[in-house]
Amino acid sequence: MTVLERSAACGDVLQPDDIARVRGAHPRLRIINGYGPTEGTTFSCCHTVPPGPVAEGSIPIGRPIANTTAYVLDRDLAPVPVGVAGELLVGGDGVALGYVNAPALTAERFLADPWNPGGRLYRTGDRVRWRANGELEFLGRMDRQVKVRGYRVEPAEVESAIAVLPGVRDAIVSTPEDPAGHRLHAYVVTDGTIDAAGVRAGLASRLPAYMIPTGFTFLDHLPLGPTGKIDRRNLPPPEMSTETRDVVRLAPSSQTEERLLGIWEQVLGVDGFGTGESFFDLGGHSLLALKLVHDVNAAFGLDLPVRFVINEPTVARQGAVIDQLRLYAPAQQTAYPLIVPLRREGGRKPFFLVAGGFGGEAELLVYVKLAEHLEHGPIYGLRIRGVDDLVEPGASVEAIAAEQVAEIRKVQPNGPYLIGGSCVGGVVAFEIAQQLRRLGEEIALLVLVDSRYPSWIWYWRYVSATLRSDLASGQFKEKLLARFRGSVDRAIERRKFQIGRLYLRRTLGYSPRPFAGEIALIISEKELRRYNPTRVWKTLTPYPLTVHPVPGDHFTHLRQYAAETAAALDKCLAKAEATSVKR
């Protein structure tokens, strides 16, 4: 082996640890990471690993080889931008004609190449993205994607993050399913110098909380099949884990906590957790949060708002609040402010984000995931006075924004201000920025998240798109009831819906004036392709719009793709703060 000069790796994902071990024995060896399905005649793409230490993270699969093409497409088979994940389709001279005696499977996997008349494409089923240098990065299989706690997760990304930790030799992640949905379980091979606590600590700086496995099994080696690939069928079941979640499970310390724990178990569909664990870490999402608020109010005879779950996400903290309310709270209805803290810590300029939809606290729940991924803080959600208060919203967008400005200045008396809004909340955010500017304050950032300037056409499209989305997911009835479940009276439910629609109509009557500042837009890719929201906003500023495309559509960019949307928002916030300091 001393004369070995070049080695091509193929057949499975190449890990940095593999390269380090080989180079330890053969420092001058040229290593090529080859990628390609059998249907593409072995290799379709190649990447030569540069000499020297291997950078942390996945090894690229490179560029298409000669006479080969590669496309990264979305679910509608449209090309995606650089950095956005999609399915890899390969074409060229190496693509097979199909499968023998399997016409249906051939039709499913082999397509005509729309960019090369007479050419053929093969759908690899692999999830990849283009890097800025023109190379492809392998992210895992499309069919391995699962939803964990409401997020779309690719287990291969978790495996890569574990594999680069010191002391880890190999890792694989499975996705067992229980009544609460999928969870992540890691099988890890180590050199004996790292345990479950060490793995979790290492992952905490690399991954969001929902991507950290809840269980670990440590093995001497991963089971392999005859071809040398990992044989998942021979992995021990997760129940055999030698180390489980090392969360301190606090037992209930009062009758209130015991009752709450039972309500949580019914809402989440899981048990075995403690009073100190977060509702959202246990799989809670916006729909379940609405149900939890309803059930807690019914059980304790209270009228708690949705912010109760956002601000007090554990059984222990909720129990303490409920006990205080029952002992000391006055009997009259509590008036809740328009500002809802989403993240109090951070030490930077506050970022204020206006709710979308009907503008109530229920609409702010979608920002919880966003706040988890954002590096910036503190973050405040702004709700619109209306559906939560059973009163009509302000008579105009100007009046609604004036209320918000007064609340914002209680938290931050002077600028520079960081203002944002999503969906129709972008219109209110725009007017908030206008009013603050007229007061002589600096607006360091005005960012509109998937916000199109409203029109009657938009209004009915929004209503119909929401209806189609809910019907397709089977959640229409549940969402309709859950949104207003805190009120038993059907008349109150109808009144809230009327107030929400009235608020949307207020935005339709708004006539904006040009804004003498820059506007940043974060737009979901499907929204950008279908309706191009830049068309109106660019007429309202003398400066060029800054546009940040993010994956998904109007309903998924803040849910399944919250991490990508947060990354784009962090860029806007960091740039605004840096520019403001220079001034």
Image (cartoon, grey):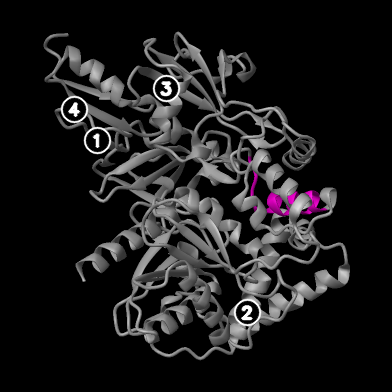
Pair 1/4: label in front: 4
Mark 2 and mark 3: Cα distance apart in space: 51 Å
Q: Which mark is residue 264?
A: none
The residue that mark 3 highlights is 198
Pair 3/1: label in front: 3
Mark 3 and mark 1: Cα distance apart in space: 32 Å
Q: Residues within 10 Å of mark 1 (few under 14, many from 20)?
A: many
For the residues bearing labels 2 and 3, Cβ distance under 8 angstroms: no
Q: Is residue 111 above or below residue 433?
A: above
Pair 2/3: label in front: 3
Q: Which mark is residue 53?
A: 4
Mark 1 and mark 2: Cα distance apart in space: 49 Å
Q: Nearer the viewer, residue 331 or 279?
A: 331
The residue that mark 2 highlights is 459
Q: Is residue 511 visible?
A: yes
Residue at point 44%, 19% (across, down):
229
Q: Residues within 10 Å of mark 4 (few under 14, many from 20)?
A: few
Point out residue 381 in the picture as x, y percentages from the top left corner.
54, 63
Type of amino acid under label 4? Pro
Q: Earlier in the sequence, mark 1 or mark 2?
A: 1
Type of amino acid under label 1? His
540 part of magenta stretch? no
| Residue farthest toward the front in the current orientation of the protein | 328
Q: Earlier in the sequence, mark 1 or mark 4?
A: 1
Chain part drawn in magenta: 283-297
